[in-house]
Amino acid sequence: MNAKNLKLKASDAAPAIDWAAVDAAPKANVPDDDSPALTRVQAAQLRPLAEALPDFSMGKTRITIHLDDAVLQAYKARAGGRGYQTLINETLRDATRKEQLADMVRAVVREELHRQA
């Protein structure tokens, strides 16, 4: 979902925030009860989310990939303002679906040819 296809009713709009009042509010030196400061021992015990909750999936995995400069520039140009990584992901997803569809069609054709023989 992006800002273009997100439509809010007037009643759903966020209330206006008085940022000057927020900036002027005193800042406490003590953390609140909901987010106390971690000790060095607690910080050392922190683990990556994937390790702590292996069954939890956010649906995407961060990877490092090397692409040709020309390919990267082409995707950045085609993506416009919505993000070239999203466009690369969509292209790969579409290619995977097309490959699966082609494999399915091949299997059906082979099955039909086998029945005809």
Image (tube, helix red, strand yellow):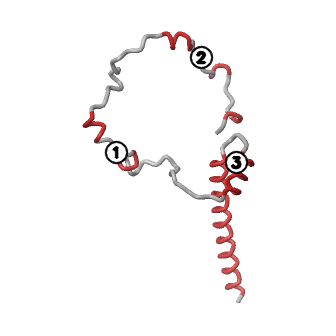
Q: Amino acid at mark 2?
A: Pro
Quadrant into which the N terminus falls: top right
Rendered position, 3 above or below 72: above
Mark 3–mark 2 CB contact (< 8 Å): no
Of circles 1 and 2, the one toward us is 1
Residue at image mark 3: 76
> Which percent across, then down, holds residue 57?
46, 49
Residue at image mark 2: 15
Who is closer to the viewer here, 78 or 102?
Answer: 78
Instruction: Determine the image quadrant of residue 30.
Output: top left
> Which percent across, then down, holds residue 59?
52, 49
Q: Amino acid at mark 3?
A: Lys
Q: Amino acid at mark 1?
A: Arg
Who is closer to the viewer here, 6 or 18?
Answer: 18
Rendered position, 37 above or below 27: below
Residue at image mark 1: 47
Q: Is residue 114 left or right of residue 59?
A: right
Quadrant into which the C terminus falls: bottom right
> Which percent across, then down, holds residue 11?
64, 19
Q: Is residue 60 left or right of residue 101?
A: left
- The CA span between labels 3 and 1 is 34 Å
For disc 1, the neighbor class at 10 Å (few under 14, some 14 to 19, many from 20) is few
Mark 3–mark 1 CB contact (< 8 Å): no
Residue at screen point 42% across, 48% down: 56
Q: Secondary structure at mark 1?
A: loop
Q: Which mark is residue 79?
A: none
- Residue furthest to the left: 41
Residue at screen point 67% across, 20% down: 10
